[in-house]
Image: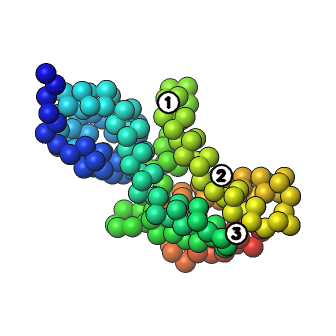
Protein backbone atom coordinates (compact mmCIF):
# COMPACT_ATOMS: atom_id res chain seq x y z
CA UNK A 1 0.00 0.00 0.00
CA UNK A 2 1.31 3.43 -0.95
CA UNK A 3 2.25 5.81 1.84
CA UNK A 4 0.26 8.99 2.21
CA UNK A 5 2.26 12.14 1.57
CA UNK A 6 3.04 14.00 4.76
CA UNK A 7 3.32 17.35 3.00
CA UNK A 8 1.39 19.71 0.77
CA UNK A 9 2.85 19.29 -2.71
CA UNK A 10 2.04 22.85 -3.83
CA UNK A 11 3.78 24.29 -0.76
CA UNK A 12 6.96 22.27 -1.28
CA UNK A 13 7.03 23.09 -5.01
CA UNK A 14 6.64 26.79 -4.19
CA UNK A 15 9.68 26.52 -1.92
CA UNK A 16 11.62 24.62 -4.58
CA UNK A 17 10.70 27.22 -7.22
CA UNK A 18 12.04 29.98 -4.97
CA UNK A 19 15.28 28.07 -4.47
CA UNK A 20 15.79 27.48 -8.20
CA UNK A 21 14.92 31.12 -8.87
CA UNK A 22 17.48 32.38 -6.33
CA UNK A 23 20.31 29.95 -7.02
CA UNK A 24 19.75 28.72 -10.56
CA UNK A 25 19.10 25.22 -11.83
CA UNK A 26 22.69 24.01 -11.97
CA UNK A 27 23.73 25.30 -8.53
CA UNK A 28 20.68 23.81 -6.80
CA UNK A 29 21.39 20.37 -5.36
CA UNK A 30 19.04 17.69 -4.09
CA UNK A 31 20.41 18.32 -0.59
CA UNK A 32 19.50 22.00 -0.90
CA UNK A 33 16.04 21.01 -2.13
CA UNK A 34 15.62 18.70 0.87
CA UNK A 35 16.40 21.50 3.27
CA UNK A 36 14.31 24.16 1.48
CA UNK A 37 11.30 21.93 0.81
CA UNK A 38 11.37 20.38 4.27
CA UNK A 39 11.08 16.84 2.95
CA UNK A 40 13.65 14.07 2.74
CA UNK A 41 15.48 12.82 -0.33
CA UNK A 42 13.35 9.66 -0.46
CA UNK A 43 10.19 11.76 -0.70
CA UNK A 44 11.73 13.93 -3.43
CA UNK A 45 12.63 10.88 -5.50
CA UNK A 46 9.32 9.12 -4.81
CA UNK A 47 7.23 12.15 -5.79
CA UNK A 48 9.32 13.86 -8.46
CA UNK A 49 11.90 11.22 -9.57
CA UNK A 50 14.87 13.63 -9.51
CA UNK A 51 15.99 17.25 -9.42
CA UNK A 52 14.79 17.73 -12.98
CA UNK A 53 11.31 16.52 -12.01
CA UNK A 54 11.20 19.01 -9.14
CA UNK A 55 12.31 21.76 -11.51
CA UNK A 56 9.67 20.91 -14.13
CA UNK A 57 6.98 21.07 -11.45
CA UNK A 58 8.50 24.37 -10.30
CA UNK A 59 8.14 25.78 -13.84
CA UNK A 60 4.48 24.73 -13.86
CA UNK A 61 3.99 26.53 -10.56
CA UNK A 62 5.84 29.59 -11.90
CA UNK A 63 3.48 29.67 -14.89
CA UNK A 64 0.53 29.61 -12.50
CA UNK A 65 1.99 32.58 -10.65
CA UNK A 66 2.28 34.49 -13.92
CA UNK A 67 -1.26 33.62 -15.02
CA UNK A 68 -2.77 36.79 -13.59
CA UNK A 69 -0.65 39.00 -15.83
CA UNK A 70 -0.79 36.55 -18.76
CA UNK A 71 -4.58 36.50 -18.51
CA UNK A 72 -4.68 40.30 -18.70
CA UNK A 73 -2.68 40.11 -21.92
CA UNK A 74 -4.80 37.25 -23.23
CA UNK A 75 -8.01 39.20 -22.62
CA UNK A 76 -6.63 42.54 -23.80
CA UNK A 77 -8.34 44.34 -26.65
CA UNK A 78 -5.73 47.09 -26.70
CA UNK A 79 -3.18 45.60 -29.11
CA UNK A 80 0.27 47.05 -28.50
CA UNK A 81 -0.97 48.93 -25.40
CA UNK A 82 -1.91 45.58 -23.82
CA UNK A 83 1.54 44.18 -24.56
CA UNK A 84 3.19 47.25 -23.05
CA UNK A 85 1.06 46.79 -19.92
CA UNK A 86 2.26 43.17 -19.77
CA UNK A 87 5.89 44.41 -19.82
CA UNK A 88 5.22 46.73 -16.86
CA UNK A 89 3.33 44.00 -14.97
CA UNK A 90 6.15 41.55 -15.65
CA UNK A 91 8.74 43.94 -14.23
CA UNK A 92 6.65 44.35 -11.08
CA UNK A 93 6.38 40.54 -10.81
CA UNK A 94 10.09 39.89 -11.37
CA UNK A 95 11.34 42.52 -8.92
CA UNK A 96 9.01 41.84 -5.98
CA UNK A 97 10.60 41.59 -2.57
CA UNK A 98 14.24 42.07 -1.71
CA UNK A 99 15.67 39.77 -4.34
CA UNK A 100 15.83 41.10 -7.89
CA UNK A 101 15.47 37.71 -9.44
CA UNK A 102 14.44 38.38 -13.04
CA UNK A 103 12.56 35.57 -14.74
CA UNK A 104 12.98 31.95 -13.66
CA UNK A 105 12.71 30.81 -17.29
CA UNK A 106 15.20 33.35 -18.67
CA UNK A 107 17.64 32.66 -15.85
CA UNK A 108 17.52 28.94 -16.58
CA UNK A 109 17.87 29.36 -20.35
CA UNK A 110 21.06 31.32 -19.67
CA UNK A 111 22.65 28.45 -17.74
CA UNK A 112 21.32 25.15 -19.12
CA UNK A 113 22.62 23.45 -22.25
CA UNK A 114 19.90 21.89 -24.40
CA UNK A 115 21.90 18.73 -25.07
CA UNK A 116 22.36 18.15 -21.32
CA UNK A 117 18.78 18.96 -20.27
CA UNK A 118 16.51 18.47 -23.32
CA UNK A 119 13.32 18.02 -21.26
CA UNK A 120 13.97 21.22 -19.34
CA UNK A 121 14.60 23.16 -22.56
CA UNK A 122 11.40 21.80 -24.14
CA UNK A 123 9.41 23.14 -21.18
CA UNK A 124 11.19 26.51 -21.24
CA UNK A 125 10.61 26.91 -25.00
CA UNK A 126 6.97 25.99 -24.57
CA UNK A 127 6.64 28.72 -21.95
CA UNK A 128 8.32 31.30 -24.20
CA UNK A 129 6.13 30.34 -27.15
CA UNK A 130 2.98 30.80 -25.06
CA UNK A 131 4.04 34.40 -24.38
CA UNK A 132 5.00 34.95 -28.02
CA UNK A 133 1.60 33.64 -29.17
CA UNK A 134 -0.07 36.20 -26.89
CA UNK A 135 2.07 38.93 -28.44
CA UNK A 136 1.02 37.75 -31.92
CA UNK A 137 -2.68 37.75 -31.08
CA UNK A 138 -2.44 41.27 -29.62
CA UNK A 139 -0.41 42.58 -32.56
CA UNK A 140 -3.01 41.14 -34.97
CA UNK A 141 -5.60 43.42 -33.42
CA UNK A 142 -4.12 46.11 -35.67
CA UNK A 143 -5.57 45.02 -39.02
CA UNK A 144 -3.16 47.33 -40.88
CA UNK A 145 -0.22 45.06 -40.03
CA UNK A 146 0.71 42.25 -42.38
CA UNK A 147 1.17 38.77 -40.91
CA UNK A 148 4.88 39.01 -41.74
CA UNK A 149 5.22 42.26 -39.76
CA UNK A 150 3.26 40.78 -36.85
CA UNK A 151 5.65 37.80 -36.72
CA UNK A 152 8.71 40.07 -36.87
CA UNK A 153 7.38 42.32 -34.13
CA UNK A 154 6.51 39.32 -31.94
CA UNK A 155 10.10 38.12 -32.27
CA UNK A 156 11.37 41.61 -31.45
CA UNK A 157 9.15 41.75 -28.36
CA UNK A 158 10.34 38.33 -27.20
CA UNK A 159 13.92 39.51 -27.47
CA UNK A 160 12.97 42.68 -25.59
CA UNK A 161 11.21 40.85 -22.73
CA UNK A 162 14.12 38.41 -22.33
CA UNK A 163 16.58 41.31 -22.20
CA UNK A 164 14.32 43.20 -19.82
CA UNK A 165 14.24 40.17 -17.55
CA UNK A 166 18.01 40.22 -17.27
CA UNK A 167 18.08 44.02 -16.88
CA UNK A 168 15.54 43.79 -14.03
CA UNK A 169 18.20 42.08 -11.93
CA UNK A 170 20.43 45.16 -11.88
CA UNK A 171 18.78 48.31 -13.22
CA UNK A 172 16.63 50.82 -11.36
CA UNK A 173 12.89 51.13 -11.91
CA UNK A 174 13.48 54.34 -13.86
CA UNK A 175 15.95 52.60 -16.17
CA UNK A 176 13.57 49.69 -16.70
CA UNK A 177 10.73 52.09 -17.48
CA UNK A 178 12.99 53.83 -20.01
CA UNK A 179 13.78 50.50 -21.68
CA UNK A 180 10.08 49.69 -21.99
CA UNK A 181 9.20 53.11 -23.36
CA UNK A 182 11.93 52.98 -26.02
CA UNK A 183 10.98 49.40 -26.93
CA UNK A 184 7.46 50.49 -27.74
CA UNK A 185 8.49 53.54 -29.79
CA UNK A 186 9.74 51.05 -32.38
CA UNK A 187 6.37 49.37 -32.97
The residue at 84%/52% (across/down) is 148
Residue under label 3 = 79
Residue extending farthest top: 1
Residue at disc 2, secondary structure: helix
The residue at 16%/36% (across/down) is 5
Q: Position of residue 144 (x, y in %)?
A: 86, 67
| Residue 75 shows up from this direction | yes
Residue at disc 1, secondary structure: helix
Q: Position of residue 68 (x, y in %)?
A: 46, 63
Q: CA distance from mark 2 to mark 1?
A: 21 Å
Residue under label 2 = 133
Q: Which mark is residue 119?
A: 1
The local crowd at label 1, few if under 14, some if 14 to 19, many if 20 or more residues have their Cα within 10 Å, is few
| Residue 157 shows up from this direction | no
Q: Where, quadrant-wise, is the N terminus in this rendering?
A: top left
**Does label 1 or label 3 sit earlier along the sequence?**
3
Q: CA distance from mark 1 to mark 3?
A: 33 Å
Amino acid sequence: MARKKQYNEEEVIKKAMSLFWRNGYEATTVRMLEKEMGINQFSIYASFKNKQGVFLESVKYYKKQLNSIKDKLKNSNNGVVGIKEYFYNFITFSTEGQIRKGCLVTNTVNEVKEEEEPEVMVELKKFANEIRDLFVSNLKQDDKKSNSLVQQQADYLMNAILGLSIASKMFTKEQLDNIIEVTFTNL
